[in-house]
Amino acid sequence: MHQRGFGLILKTRKECKKMRYRMLRYIDGKPKAVTFSYDDGCRQDIILSQLLYKYKLKGTFNLNSDWFGKNVNDQHLTKEEIKNYIISNGHEIAVHGAQHLANGNVRSVNGIYDVLKCRLDLEREFDCIVRGMAYPDTGISLFQNNASFKKIRNYLIDLDIVYARSFNTKGGNFELPDDWHNLIPTAHHDDEKLFTYIDSFLNFKPTDVYPAKRSPKLFYLWGHSYEFDQNNNWDRIEKICQALSGKQDIWYATNIEIYNYVSAYNSLIFSANGTKIYNPSVQTVWFDIDGVTHSVNPNETLRIE
């Protein structure tokens, strides 16, 4: 009886040796991703969108649906310009509040209305499904009128908003978010240490670090395109694009593409010893196990010895 139990323990330990460090990898097994997020739907977004397209970069443009421009002299994009310069270039459009209300400063009923109206407007005008958001104004940095992050997060989930970007920054931290409803960018484009962050990001190689630290990296830049006019520094964003573009180990994606992919990875189903992996999602998923990249197709099971 005792020997049989001891044998079972040995077998279990042997099986457990097969459980190794597993890390998400992006499309085609890439360890890094880059995305951009720009707010308010200002006319300067046309120039920015064209720059991103020129360098084969992708971003998310966060729009206020009550602020669509009426003509080319308006400071905000018209509906036609959003179609022709943002959506047609492969970028995402996302909620930024119909009236740009700071969610932390208003009652839940007002915050819900501002988010929902914006989402409904965008989906109707541009015939798409909108699930992303950037917090307007002071966002979730200040709270009044009985607002709280918990309440805001709960109603965003109920409204099918799957991520919401804040405007605080992580100062060179490239990890994926712990909470997608408090999505904190890497940096604002005018951060004085930005190019130091870019160098650090580009120089990261998973094989150069301890296995437990080989997590996927995300470089997330945010801002307002009108700031390039205000500061007369359009050359800065072009240098940023030049520095980040054209890298074989980087996936260039919109915010929602990254969220959807990470969700697909998190939906993978593993056997107890980690040797069988089932992918219930609709897209191929890549991951790393002890330095070896694997992929599993939709509705398939991968077996790893």
Image (tube, grey):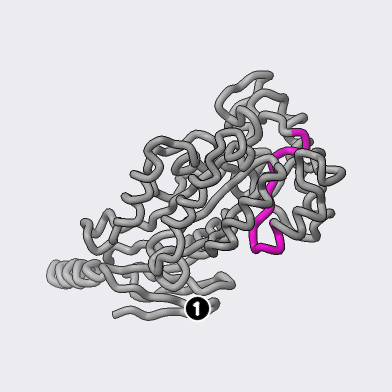
Q: Quadrant of the N terminus?
A: bottom left
Name which residue lies at 66% across and 48% down. 45
Q: Quadrant of residue 164?
A: top right
Callout 1, which amino acid? Asn
Residue 259 in the figure: left or right of residue 98: left
Residue at the left extreme? 3
Find residue 57 and report its horizontal and vertical position in percent.
54, 60
The answer to if 17 sits in the magenta stretch is no
Name which residue lies at 64% across and 39% down. 226
Q: Residues within 10 Å of mark 1 (few under 14, many from 20)?
A: some
Residue 257 in the figure: left or right of residue 207: right
Find residue 118 and report its horizontal and vertical position in percent.
77, 43
Is 182 or 146 nearer to us in this picture?
Answer: 182
- Tell me if residue 44 comes above or below residue 16 in the rendering: above
Name which residue lies at 46% across and 46% down. 177
Is 262 or 77 nearer to us in this picture?
Answer: 77
Is any atom of residue 1 visible in this view?
no
Q: Which element type, helix, strand or loop, lies under badge 1?
A: loop
Name which residue lies at 22% across and 60% down. 208
Provide the residue span drawn in magenta.
Answer: 86-99
Residue 184 in the figure: left or right of residue 65: left
Q: Quadrant of the C terminus?
A: bottom left
Q: Quadrant of residue 10?
A: bottom left
Is 253 or 104 nearer to us in this picture?
Answer: 253
Is any atom of residue 214 visible in this view?
yes
- Tell me if residue 202 comes above or below residue 5 in the rendering: above
Find residue 40 and report its horizontal and vertical position in percent.
69, 40
Residue for badge 1: 297
